Image: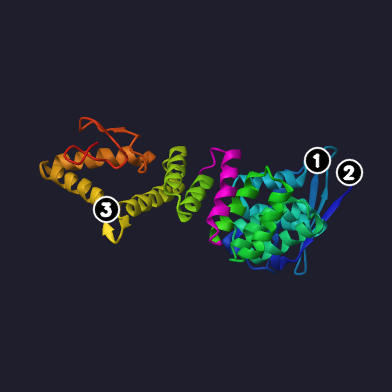
Amino acid sequence: MEQQTFTIPPGTFDVTLLPVDARQPGTPAFREAVSAFLQSQFHGFGGSANIFVDDQRISVTWSPDASPAKPLDLVVAKLQQGRQAEGIQLLELLLSRHPDDVDVLYNLGMALSDARKLELAERHLRRAVELAPEFANGRIALGVALTRQQKDMEALTHLKAAVELEPENHWARHNYGVTLLKLREPQLAADQLSQAVAMQPDDQPTWVALGDALRLGGEAKAAGQAYSRAIKLNPHNDFAEAARQSSSQLAQASFEGRTGGKIRLDAMQYCLGAIREFSGMSSQQVQALVFEIAMLGRNGFDTNSAEKKYQIKSKVGAFSGLLRIPGSVGQ
């Protein structure tokens, strides 16, 4: 197998990968630590590697064995394991030999974007798209890097192109929809996000984004249903908490709904009924009831339907998402 040589300037090496006492370029400790790091990394590629480090360059000459592993595949595996700094450093080495390799540019750009090194990420992803204009995932990654820099209009162009290239690409529609939402186009966003969740019904972030688009577009009931679906998928993470907060805002907006400048009397009646009920309970009973409601609500309540009922052990009867308790107007 043909030898391959990868060369980068010492100043571009990520010193956070080295021991604290070996991070000064030009020192013997730096040269030794860089050599040890690269030797350990290339060992897994199969074959042997000669490492050279001086004040002008860091060079790796790799002699693959008869059936070497593909370095890019191994580097991508590191990124998937969360070993981001290692992956970026190795991708930069691979790029030094293959500057027009679309796959290397794409993976390096995505890794840099996730590391919030956005200008550098944008540069590599632009090059990938220039080399492969019909590479939908490249356009998606570039669009994401651009939105992270608040370059939303340009991002929209690339994300729309990705959807046109691959209409069944879930992430193309997800990111296109999210960017439309940022640009205050809720109906267009909801259309894209609805198609995205149809492709991947278990994608929680897309359900939350769909709820936001529907809420902004004035479709409260559908938004509440989207938030409920998001919470049920995984009630114990940040996406679920965001859905709960947005769902609560929906419920509050419904509660405070005004007609002709007047507060809704039915909502006031429900509150007065609840106050009367709580006034006849001890503090321990109130705490027990509130705790039970809170535990029940971890999966979300449907606050827009009187048909959906919930059981509360400490109270007899079935209750809607408005949590009407005995003493209020109806159940």
**Residue that appears at 38% across and 51% down:** 250
- Local packing at callout 3 (Cα closer than 10 Å; few below 14, some 14-19, many 20+) is some
Q: Which mark, by number, is residue 1?
A: 2
Residue under label 1, please give it: 68
Q: Amino acid at mark 2?
A: Met
Q: Which residue is mark 3?
A: 264
Mark 2–mark 1 CB contact (< 8 Å): yes
Between 9 and 124, the one lying in front of the other is 124
Using the rendered view, name the quadrant where residue 296 is placed: top left
Instruction: Using the image, determine if residue 222 lies above or below residue 183.
Output: above
Residue 328, given in percent of the width and then of the height, sits at 19, 41
Mark 1, other Cα within 10 Å: few <14 / some 14–19 / many ≥20: few
- Whether 283 is drawn above or below 94: the answer is above
Q: CA distance from mark 1 to mark 3?
A: 72 Å
Name which of mark 1 and mark 3 comes first in the sequence. Answer: 1
User: What is the three-letter code of the residue carrying label 1?
Assistant: Pro
Q: Which residues are magenta?
A: 183-204
Quarter of the image with the C terminus in it: top left
Q: Nearer the viewer, mark 1 or mark 3?
A: 3
Q: Secondary structure at mark 2?
A: loop
Q: Do we see residue 52 in this rendering?
A: no
- Amino acid type of the residue that numbered disc 3 sits on in the rendered structure: Arg
Point out the image quarter for the N terminus: top right
- Residue 315 picture quarter: top left
Q: Earlier in the sequence, mark 2 or mark 1?
A: 2
Badge 2: few (under 14), some or many (20 or more) residues near its Cα, within 10 Å? few
